[in-house]
Image: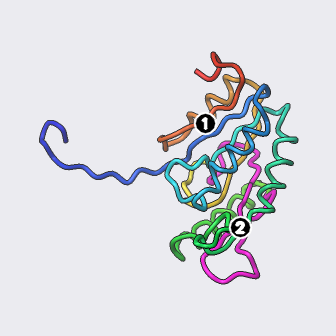
Amino acid sequence: SAENFAQVSLELGGKSPFIVFDDANIESAVNGSIAGIFAASGQSCVAGSRLYLHEDIADEFLARMIKIAKGIKLGDPQVDDTEMGPLCTQGQIEHITHQVALAQDEGGTVLVGGKRPADMKGLFFEPTIIECPNQNMTIVDTELFGPVLAVQRFKTEEEVLTLANDSQHGLAAGIFTRDSARSL
């Protein structure tokens, strides 16, 4: 396009990985992960929608994250105490609902959320965290553009780098560690 002076407009999908190593500040990483996926109801191309947790901290991390996710107040985004608003279209709700069901069929475990709130009208979907037993699940590399987080555990730096880079989507990534050399 630059050679032809053509205008370009791109709609880029994302499935951004967040990596949390065993030396990370857990509270900071949980807060960053919550904001990374549930801000704007997950409707961001750079949402941290894939979470890779070192196996030594995964249980504690998930317990903290689930507790926060369960307490997120859904509602009108113009009301001060609302923490997460609705999705934009009915099509998104249908796509997300289908992908969550498919993830369960493929062996994923819904740790929190996974459905529309029964007591609310509108295009709301609960903050959802799904533990994924492997990288080959459809939800791991399908952009949902909603409040759904796919979580996997890892053992080594080499393993998680392979997993994080195994995506047809790019755009962003997050790394939580106290080791600046590792983060680079």
Crowd tier of the residue under label 2, counting other residues whose Cα lies within 10 Å: few below 14, some 14–19, many 20 or above = many
Residue furthest toward the top? Answer: 181
Local SS, label 2: loop
Toward the viewer: 71 or 95?
71
Residue tagged 2: 126
Measuring from the top left, give residue 156's x and y in whole percent. Answer: 74, 24
Side (left or right) of 9 relative to 68: left
Residue pictured at 68% horizontal, 52% vertical: 149
Coloration of the structure image: rainbow
Residue 170, given in percent of the width and then of the height, sits at 48, 40
Q: Is residue 178 magenta?
A: no
Reply above or below: 84 against 141. Answer: below
Disc assigned to residue 57: none
Quadrant in which the C terminus is drawn: top right
Label 1: which residue? 174
The reply to whether the C-beta atoms of the residues labelled 2 and 1 are less than 8 Å apart is no
Q: In the rendered image of this protein, does residue 147 appear above or below residue 164?
A: below
**Residue type, mark 1 in image:** Gly
Amino acid of disc 2:
Glu
Q: Secondary structure at mark 1?
A: strand
Answer left or right for 34 relative to 155: left
| Horizontal side, residue 183 vs residue 130: left or right | left
User: For the point 67% across and 30% down, which residue is it?
Assistant: 160
Depth check: 103 or 118 in front? 118
Numbered range of the magenta stretch: 110-139
Specify the quadrant that holds the N terminus. Answer: top left
**Upstream in the sequence, badge 2 or badge 1?**
2
